[in-house]
Image (spheres, helix red, strand yellow):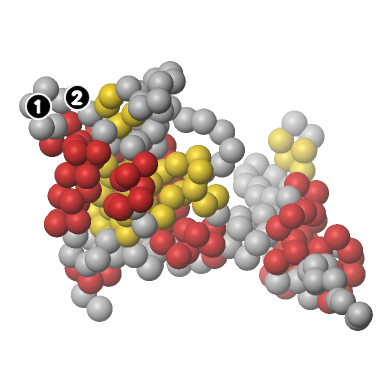
Amino acid sequence: MSMTESCRRFTVISLFPELIQAFAEVGIVRRACERGLATINSIDPRAFTPDGRGNVDDSPYGGGPGMVMTVPPLRAAIREARDRAATRPCVAYLSPQGRRLDQALIEELTHQRDLILVAGRYEGIDERIVERDVDVEISLGDFVLSGGEIAAMAIIDAVVRLLPGALGSALSSGADSFSDNLLEYPQYTRPEIVDGQAVPAVLLSGNHAEIARWRRRESIRRTALRRPDLLENAPLSAAERQEYPGSAPTTPDRDDN
């Protein structure tokens, strides 16, 4: 597979393209772009306003507070992004009404060569855009942001981390929290003792099998304490599920009648 074929192309439809540009110039995302693993561009709907004045919003039909992003400039921006795509793109609208973002969804999105992320503002976008131009709605969670740019950047960052060659170590993303429905084990570094707090002795033992077992136990224990909802679908052994009874998968009630 050539570098061009393996590259993921992200286009963010945003009224604030400077946010996306700044994000693309730091850290892992910047390095991925430099290595040809990803490209990140933005399109400002203001460039497509029919009146030439840059107005992209209007008051909602039926009354109510705030403004709504209008169809013509937003649809034109999405069409422009589609025309730039090398493959059939997936268009995602960042919306509090969308599917909750999790690692499973991020892994699905890594299969998209071209991903168009629509960042709304104000009270949202005209529903006719959602009906005709959007493939999926995605939500970061049950809270409100000023716009979809932060959600778009979160998706790009999470997808880029999974691209082969994006991280310094091929093992890094596999050890992240949620990679196997478990939170990551605690991490420590030098010095060995700080203000009376010592690194667990097992990590200093050099016994890699014992370290791996300790990390596995700590990962399960931490998940049970902090995110027990994750354990149901975690790949635990029978012995591990016996140690953490709340982790047993649920099964539908059987109707014997």
Residue at image x 25%, y 78%?
Answer: 1
Q: Nearer the viewer, residue 169 or 163?
A: 163
Mark 1 Cα shell of 10 Å, populated few (<14), some (14-19), many (≥20): few
State the residue in front, 22 or 27.
22
Q: Quadrant of the C terminus?
A: bottom right
In the rendered image, residue 184, in percent from the top left (x then y), is placed at 65, 55
Q: The residue under label 1 is which amino acid type?
A: Asp
In screen coordinates, is 96 left or right of 197?
left
Residue farthest to the left, as pictured: 52
CA gap, disc 2 to disc 1? 8 Å
Residue type, mark 2 in image: Asn
Estimate the x, y position of residue 232 in percent, counting from the top left. 75, 64
Q: Which residue is denoted by mark 1 in the rendering? A: 51
Picture coordinates of residue 12, whole percent (x, y): 28, 44
Residue 70 in the image: above or below residue 38: above
16 shown above or below 82: above
- The residue positioned 32% from the left and 59% from the top of the image is 90
